[in-house]
Structures are given as C-alpha cells and as structure tokens.
Image (spheres, helix red, strand yellow):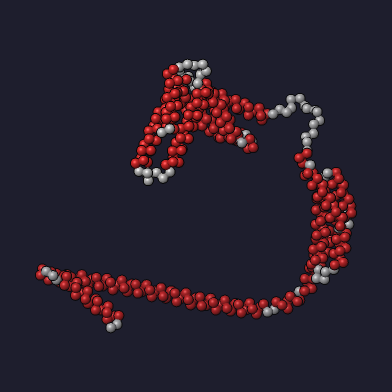
C-alpha cells in the first residue's frame, strides 16, 4: 500500500469517528445540514490556505531561479574579462625588457642625487670630525651628536647606494669605509664621554658660591600650604560647641558637625580651588591630607584629655559582662562535646584557642590598669571591679 492510500484511509477513519461523535444523540440529526455547511466552509478555507502556501513556494522558486540565472551570467562575464586580462598580461614581459634602460637611468639618477646631497659632508669630513672632537672636549655633547649624526647618515647613504649597484665593487666599499674611519673613532669618543658623565651622576654636588640675595628663598608655596593647614585646624577646632559636662552626647555632636564641615569644605575645594591652583599642586589631595592630619590630632587630643576614671570603670563593667557571657559559652561548648564527642572534630584546638584568648585579655587588662589608672588613687569599689574582671578571665582559662 502506498503512502497516499494510507493517508486516505486515516482520513476516512477520522471522518467516520467525527461523524459518530456528532450523531450520538437523536436530537443532533436535525443539525446535519448545519454541520455539513460548517465542514464545507472549513474545507474551502483549508484549500485556500494550501493554494496560497503552494503559490508562495512557487514564487520563491521562481525568484531563486532568476537569481541563479543572473549569477550564471555574471560568472560568464567574469570569465570573459579574465581571458581578456590574461591576453593583456602576455605583453608585460617584453615591456619589462624595453624599460630596462629606464630602470638603469633611474638607478643612476638616484645615486647622483645621493652623492650630491652628501657632497657637502664628504668634502668636509676632516673639518667636521675636528669640530666634533672640539665640541666633545668643551662638553657641548648635543652639538657633537648632531654633527656626528650628519656624518653617519652620509656614510650610510653612500654605502647603501654601493650595495644597490648590480656590479658591487669591494674596493669602493673599502675605500669609502677608510675615508669615514675617523667617524667611528669620534663615535667611540662620544660614547666614553657620556659613560663618564653617567658614572659621575651620584657624585654631582650643588655649587655653593656663598652668595644669597636678601629674602631668598621666599618659599611661597610652603608658606601658602602652612596658612591653609592652619585654617583647616581652626575650622575643625571651631566645631566643638558643647563641653562634656553640659551635653552627654557631646562627642557624637562634635563628630557629626566635623563630618558635615569636611564634606562641605571638600566640595568647595573641588569646584573652586582646582581651577585656581596649578595642576601639579594636586590641591584636592593636599586638602584631604590636611584634614586627615588635623582631625587625627584633634581626636587624639580629645581622647587623651577627656577620658575619665568613670569611663574607665564603665569599660571594666562592659568587659566583665562580656567575660561572663564568654565563660558561659565555653561551659556549654564543653558540655555539648562530652555529650556527643563526634560533633566537634577539633575540640582540643578550640580549647587551646580559648585559653590563649583568656590569657591575652588578662594581659590587656593589666596594661590598661598601668596606663590609665590614676596614680595614687585608692578606691576599694573600683579595685573590686577590676579584680572581678581579672578573675572572670582567669576562671575561663582554667575551665
């Protein structure tokens, strides 16, 4: 059975199944005419779509055939032109032979031009060599280099023209090199002089004549930056408006005002100062560095001046509270490990770290007492707080 017969049988089976589905109930017999019209319209629509698709394919095939025909014509035209070009190129080799005389004349003319350009250097080689030696002796190395460069260019151009000759003469080359042999000697002399100067670079010293004009050096730039740095320090100092006794949040207020002031000043520097100062002054980074130095000095002074014994005791309370939490956490950690030893793989390493941390906290506490505890002050409650803090970490160390 062919493929078309199979498709036809499948279509008939599908049609029978669709009719059976439509006629399952007696009331549907009255709609047979309606179903017939609907299927007829659907068939007509599908046929129209099929015709349109086939027509589109045919149009595409027609366009493709037309383009292939045009390509074939172009290929034939290119082949024809290639044949014509091949015929034209056959006449080139005889033309090369006929132009041989012109090539020789051009080569000869090029040599004459080079010789004419180098004549002034050729006839003055001894004089130029002597002048170059004199300039090297006087330390005028740039003049000596310029003259040496002219001599070397003339020699190299002449050697190149000799190299281009079809019948090269070694005698001419040897004679030309012998005529310019002093040039190589001067070049070596200049090289020695430059090496000597470079070797003495680190030994060069500033000449001191003992004379200094009045008021020199003025150091205007250094003075300008000193004034700017003083202005920055004054602006940072001027932001401290509250004293510690009057406002508990004085430090927060001071730092916030300083932050706002620095941001505003840096905006002014970036927009107004950059066009006014030379680029190599790098004024923005200079101002940033000034604010960094002045603010660091101000904060350091504030900390060293304003820290009190009460703040030290408050810090001791906070550290003691942390020590108690740390100790409780260590106890829970050990209990969890002994309950299930497979949970923590490196229990010993953790315990060694805990002991080291506790010892370090004890050392830091002792250093803080030696540095910040008021000399000669005897305060039993404060001393009890400090001993409690030390005992907390010592107990943690031996858990």
Q: Which residue corresponds to the image point at 81% horizontal and 50% vertical from the top-left?
A: 191
- Residue 340 placement, left or right of 222: left
Determine whether 293 is above or below 139 in the image: above
Which residue appears farthest toward the left when viewing the image?
26
Image quadrant in which the C terminus is located: top left
Determine whether 313 is above or below 169 in the image: above
* Residue 180 shows in this picture: yes
The x, y position of residue 200, in whole percent, is 79, 42
Question: For residue 290, which quarter of the picture?
Answer: top right
Question: For residue 223, which quarter of the picture?
Answer: top right
- Residue 190 placement, left or right of 340: right
Q: Which residue corresponds to the image point at 85% horizontal and 49% vertical from the top-left?
A: 132
Along the line of sight, the residue nearer the viewer: 271 or 169? 169
Image quadrant in which the N terminus is located: bottom left
Along the line of sight, the residue nearer the viewer: 311 or 28? 311
Q: Which residue corresponds to the image point at 66% horizontal and 78% vertical from the top-left?
A: 88
Q: Which residue corresponds to the image point at 82% horizontal and 58% vertical from the top-left?
A: 154
Which residue appears farthest toward the bottom when viewing the image?
1
- Residue 19 placement, left or right of 75: left
The total number of labels drawn is: 0
* Residue 236 shows in this picture: no
The x, y position of residue 72, in whole percent, is 51, 78
Determine whether 82 is above or below 303 in the image: below
């Amino acid at each position: 059975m062919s493929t078309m017969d199979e498709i036809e049988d499948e279509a008939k089976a599908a049609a029978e199944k669709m009719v059976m589905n439509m006629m399952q109930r007696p009331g549907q017999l009255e709609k047979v005419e309606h179903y017939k019209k609907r299927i007829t319209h659907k068939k007509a629509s599908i046929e129209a779509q099929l015709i349109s698709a086939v027509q589109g394919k045919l149009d595409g095939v027609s366009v493709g055939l037309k383009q292939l025909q045009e390509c074939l014509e172009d290929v034939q035209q290119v082949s024809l032109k290639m044949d014509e070009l091949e015929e034209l190129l056959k006449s080139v080799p005889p033309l090369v032979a006929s132009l041989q005389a012109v090539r020789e004349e051009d080569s000869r003319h090029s040599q004459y031009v080079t010789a004419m350009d180098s004549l002034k250097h050729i006839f003055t080689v001894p004089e130029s060599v002597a002048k170059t030696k004199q300039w090297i002796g006087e330390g005028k190395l740039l003049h000596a280099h310029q003259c040496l460069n002219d001599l070397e260019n003339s020699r190299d151009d002449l050697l190149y023209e000799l190299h281009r000759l079809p019948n090269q003469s070694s005698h001419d080359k040897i004679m030309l090199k012998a005529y310019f042999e002093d040039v190589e000697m001067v070049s070596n002399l200049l090289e020695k002089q430059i090496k000597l100067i470079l070797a003495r670079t680190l030994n060069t010293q500033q000449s001191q004549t003992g004379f200094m004009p009045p008021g020199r050096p003025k150091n205007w730039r250094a003075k300008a930056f000193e004034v700017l740095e003083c202005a920055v320090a004054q602006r940072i100092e001027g932001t401290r408006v509250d004293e510690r006794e009057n406002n508990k949040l004085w430090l927060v207020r001071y730092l916030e005002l300083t932050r706002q002031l620095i941001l505003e000043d840096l905006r002014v520097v970036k927009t107004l100062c950059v066009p006014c100062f030379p680029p190599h002054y790098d004024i923005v980074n200079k101002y940033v560095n000034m604010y960094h130095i002045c603010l660091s000095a101000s904060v350091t002074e504030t900390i060293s001046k304003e820290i009190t014994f009460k703040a030290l005791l408050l810090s001791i309370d906070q550290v003691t509270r942390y020590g108690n939490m740390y100790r409780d956490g260590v106890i829970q950690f050990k209990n969890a490990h002994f309950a299930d030893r497979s949970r923590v793989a490196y229990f010993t390493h953790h315990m060694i770290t805990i002991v080291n941390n506790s010892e370090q906290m004890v050392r830091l506490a002792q250093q803080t007492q030696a540095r910040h505890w008021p000399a000669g002050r005897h305060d039993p409650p404060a001393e009890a707080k400090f001993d409690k803090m030390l005992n907390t970490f010592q107990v943690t160390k031996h858990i």
